[in-house]
């Protein structure tokens, strides 16, 4: 009996209510269906964090079927033609070049601000910016920071102990949050 009460208490105490912080910047939101995801900037000491999160976003967004996502190779070819290296900031010239080549509704750029994967701690924080492709106008931003331990249910069950696993769960949380706020989607 005591063990059951302890397990329930631990499960309730261990679950934190953290959600992505989504800030709307446009008063009237255009329909965002087709998206070009730009390579993410990595501001951390974890060398592959930007590429990892970028590819997880591409995969999850395409898999959700809520957005039409331009293939990674198409974006890379545009960047190479314009002599723009992946991970650079979005400039008006770059935005215009991508829009003219793809005619997408929006451009998603991201920046990884923290990435830690140690034996007893996994932490990730990133910021995303969704811009209208035709004008470059900022539509919304999303900031999200989580620890692998934040997903713990009971004792150590549910805890995420890899950066890749944490990134995948966080991306699903962000997409769910966007869906709940009615942001984007082709349906």
Image (cartoon, grey):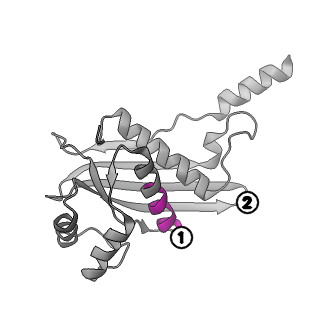
Image position of 88 with respect to 17: above or below: below
Q: The C terminus lies in which quarter of the figure?
A: top left
Question: Which residue is located at x 24 percent, y 46 percent?
Answer: 32
| Disc number placed over residue 151 in the picture, else none | none
Mark 1 burial class by Cα count in 10 Å: few <14, some 14-19, many 20+: few
Residue at mark 2 to residue at mark 1: CA–CA distance: 18 Å
Placement of 8 over or under 144, stated as above or below? above
Q: What is the magenta range?
A: 48-57
Q: Is residue 99 left or right of residue 36?
A: left
In the rendered image, which quarter is residue 90 located in? Answer: bottom left
Identified at 73% across, 39% down, the residue is 157
Mark 1, residue position: 48
Quick check: 161 left or right of 171? Answer: right
Q: Nearer the viewer, residue 160 or 62?
A: 62
- Which of 73 and 88 lies nearest the eye of the viewer? 73
- Provide the residue designation for mark 2: 119
Position in image of residue 43 (x %, y %): 45, 68
């Amino acid at each position: 009996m005591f063990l059951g009460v302890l397990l329930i208490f631990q499960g309730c105490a261990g679950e934190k209510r953290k959600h992505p912080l989504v800030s709307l910047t446009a008063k009237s939101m255009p329909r965002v269906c087709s998206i070009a995801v730009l390579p993410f900037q990595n501001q951390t000491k974890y060398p592959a964090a930007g590429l990892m999160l970028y590819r997880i976003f591409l995969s999850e967004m395409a898999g959700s079927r809520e957005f039409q996502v331009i293939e990674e190779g198409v974006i890379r070819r545009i960047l190479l033609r314009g002599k723009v290296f992946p991970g650079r900031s979005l400039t008006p010239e770059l935005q215009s070049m991508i829009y003219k080549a793809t005619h997408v509704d929006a451009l998603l750029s991201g920046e990884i601000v923290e990435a830690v994967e140690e034996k007893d701690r996994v932490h990730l924080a990133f910021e995303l910016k969704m811009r209208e492709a035709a004008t470059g106008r900022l539509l919304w931003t999303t900031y999200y920071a989580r620890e692998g331990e934040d997903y713990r249910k009971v004792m150590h069950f549910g805890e995420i102990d890899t950066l890749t696993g944490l990134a995948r769960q966080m991306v699903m949380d962000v997409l769910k949050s966007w869906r709940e706020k009615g942001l984007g989607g082709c349906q």
